[in-house]
Image (cartoon, grey):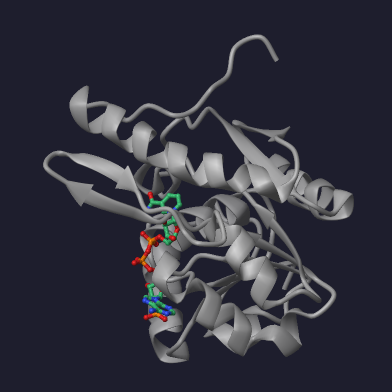
Amino acid sequence: MDVGIIGGTGPAGRGLGLRLAAGGVSVAIGSRDPDRAAAVVDEMAAPWPGRLVGELHGVANEDAAGAKLVVLATPWEGAVRTASALSGQLEGKVLVSMGNALVREVGEMLPLVHPRGSIAAAVQAAIPRTRVAAAFHHLPAREMADLDSGLIADVLVCADDPEATAETMSLVERIEGLRPLDAGSLSQAAAIEAFTAVFVTLNIRHRAHSTLKLAGI
Ligand SMILES: NC(=O)c1ccc[n+]([C@@H]2O[C@H](COP(=O)([O-])OP(=O)(O)OC[C@H]3O[C@@H](n4cnc5c(N)ncnc54)[C@H](OP(=O)(O)O)[C@@H]3O)[C@@H](O)[C@H]2O)c1
C-alpha cells in the first residue's frame, strides 16, 4: 500500500482515503477491528464504480502502519496511545497527524490546548524515531467523501523534517483541487490545530461549508 490511514474508518479517514484512491493512490484503511475496516471499505467504494483508480483495502491499524506513508486519523484522545503502540511499524517513516483537539460549547467550537502545544507535537514526542508532519486539519470530511463536490482548498503542512514536509506535500498534490502550503516547523501545528475551532465555528455561524483558501500566495 502507498498510504495507510490509522483510524481510517471515521469520517476524516474515509474522506481522505476516498479522495486519495480517486487520485490513483492505493490506500489501506486501518481500524482496531479489521472486519470493521473491510466493511467500511465496501461502503466507501460502492457509490463510486470506476472512479477509484487506486485500490482501497480494509486492514488492522498494525497493517496500515506498514504502508510507505502513514496518516493518523484517530480522535485526538487516542492519538498518542495509538501511535506509541505502533512505534515499531512507524520507525523511520513519515506519519501525518491530522488530529484536532476541540470541544463544542454553546454553539461554537473551542480549542483544547495540549500540554505539548499540539497533538502533532505530542505524537512526535511519543515516537521520536518517526518523522511527524501535521496536515489536513481544515478539510471537511463530508465534502471529501463526495467525489462530485468540487473541492478547492489549501492544506497547511508543517514538520521539523524537510523530507516529511516534502512527502506530505506530494501526498496532498495527489488530490485534485487541493494545494499544499509549507507552513513551517512542527511548532506551527499548535496554531493550525487551534484555528480549526475558529474555522468550524465560522461554518456553524454562517451555516456554510467553506474551505480554507489563502489569497496572495
Ligand atoms: N471530521 C472531520 O471533518 C475532520 C476534518 C479534519 C480533521 N479531523 C480530525 O481527524 C481525526 C478523525 O476525525 P473523525 O471525525 O474521523 O473521528 P472519529 O470518527 O471519532 O474516529 C476515527 C476512527 O478512530 C478510531 N477510534 C475511535 N476512538 C479511538 C481511540 N480512543 N483510540 C484509537 N482509535 C480510536 C475509530 O475506528 P475503529 O473503531 O475502526 O478503530 C474511528 O472510526 C480527529 O482527530 C479530527 O479532529 C476531522
Q: Is residue 85 above or below residue 64?
A: below
Question: From where the camera sits, is residue 4 visible?
Answer: no
Quadrant in the picture for residue 206: top left
Q: Residue at left 65%, top 60%? A: 96
- 158 or 33: which is nearer to us? 158
Report the residue at 74% width, 67% height from top: 2
Q: Position of residue 124 (x, y in %)?
A: 68, 67
- Between residue 28 and residue 208, name the one nearer to us: 208
How many numbered badges does the structure rendering display?
Answer: 0
Residue located 37% across and 53% down the image: 112
**Residue 164 in sight here:** yes
Image position of 96 (left or right of 56) = right
Q: Ligand 1, what quadrant?
A: bottom left
Q: Quadrant of the N terminus?
A: bottom right
Q: Is residue 77 left or right of residue 56?
A: left
Q: Position of residue 43 (x, y in %)?
A: 36, 69
Query: In front here: 5 or 77?
Result: 77
Q: In the image as oriented, which residue stretches furthest toward the right? A: 163
Residue positioned most to the front? 115
Quadrant hosting residue 97: bottom right
Give the percent coordinates (x, y) of residue 3.
Answer: 69, 66
Outermost residue on the top side: it is 216
Q: Quadrant of residue 143?
A: top left
Question: In what quadrant of the picture does the C terminus appear?
Answer: top right
Query: Vertically, is 205 above or below 167?
Result: above
- Image coordinates for residue 5, horizontal then vertical, percent: 58, 69
Against 185, residue 29 (above or below) is: below
